[in-house]
Image (spheres, rainbow, N blue to C red):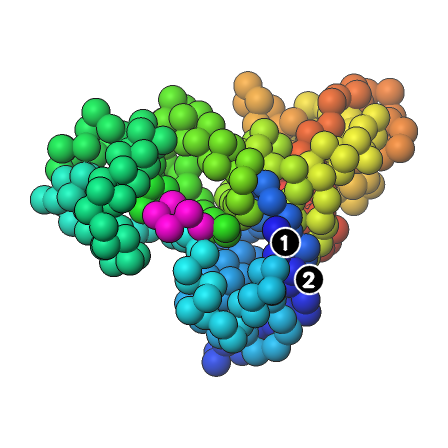
Amino acid sequence: MQLTIQNLSKTYANGVKALSGVSLTIGTGMYGLVGPNGAGKSTLMRTLATLQEADSGSATLDDINVLTQKDAVRRVLGYLPQEFGLYPNQTALDMLDHIAVLKGVSARGERKALVTALLQQTNLYDERKKKLGTFSGGMKQRFGIAMALIGQPRLLIVDEPTAGLDPTERNRFLNLLSSIGQNVIVILSTHIIDDVRELCTRMAIITKGQVLLEGNPQAVIDEIAGHVWTKAIDASEMASYQQQMTVVSSHLVAGRTQIRVCSPAPPDASFAPTEANLEDVYFMKLAHSSAQPVTH
């Protein structure tokens, strides 16, 4: 199974170019999309989910033309947007049963078996008779996945699914996504870089509607291994260091500014080597794109 995107472009009426010649090849498994707000990730996902039109380019899911055969795409698509509404007074059981009817599962026995299996898969079976309005954030996200999985989709698109979840719910949800990704294409859009590193076999960094990098998360980390250095400085020194070297990112540690620099050799003896990570890759690509270091 393969999703092939070629030269996809979209410009909004206000002149904002949301996508500019995006080309990606995505196979079965977890695929991560990362980028800042306004990068074009949501536009790409909404286009693939048949919710808006592209200006040019193509997208195919095996033999289905995603841009023109929208009904065919919807039959094999599962979509979990960042925000989705639920009927608070409906139980999980009744709501899933209703959606299964809308998806064309008309036989009562088949529908019951499907709903039961989805509730068990998402660890919601014991809560099946509770009203959705009483669900926690993590439970709602897992219920959203259950809804998206009705119809056994070949393509599952999820947008910021772990935002706002506590660590326990986040781990539970990520384990669920990982198990689903063994059999279908799962596109995961997230701001949480660790989610991509832990789950995805391929990833893309997108900003300003363009793909800055595409590859295997560990492989792109390995490319800068041994080239990342760190040092604690006073905040007043930041401008000077930015002029002298490539400061990839900075953050506060115990009241001091800790900078991370990418360089084949230590800038000077005061820098210590540190293990490269996916955030370094991400911030470096964004910094090179904007010609500005990233602070977090």
**Relative image position of residue 252 (x, y in whole percent):** 57, 27
- Badge 2, how many Cα within 10 Å: few under 14, some, many 20+? some
The CA span between labels 2 and 1 is 13 Å
Residue at image x 37%, y 50%? 151
- What is the count of numbered marks? 2
Residue 124 in the image: above or below residue 91: above
Q: Residue furthest left?
A: 89
Residue to which mark 2 is pinned? 23
- Badge 1, how many Cα within 10 Å: few under 14, some, many 20+? some
Quadrant of residue 135 within the rendered picture: top left
| Magenta residue span | 148-153
Residue at image x 42%, y 52%? 78
Going from N to C along the chain, the mark reached first, 2 or 1, is: 1
Task: Kindly report which numbered mark, 2 or 1, lies closer to the viewer in this rendering.
Answer: 1
**Relative image position of residue 230 (x, y in whole percent):** 74, 25
**Relative image position of residue 96 (x, y in whole percent):** 23, 45
Majority secondary structure of magenta residues? loop
Residue at image x 36%, y 42%? 145
Check disc 2 and give the amino acid type.
Answer: Ser
Check disc 1 and give the amino acid type.
Answer: Gln
In the image, taking residue 234 as reference, residue 76 lies left or right, namely left
**Relative image position of residue 94 (x, y in whole percent):** 15, 44
Residue 153 in the image: above or below residue 53: above
The answer to whether one can see residue 279 in this image is: no
* Residue situated in front as seen by the camera: 22 or 212: 22
Magenta-span inclusion, residue 231: no
Mark 2 element type? strand
Quadrant of residue 222 within the rendered picture: top right
- Disc ID at residue 2: 1
In the image, taking residue 213 as reference, residue 115 lies left or right, namely left
* Residue situated in front as seen by the camera: 3 or 230: 3
Residue 19 in the image: above or below residue 152: below
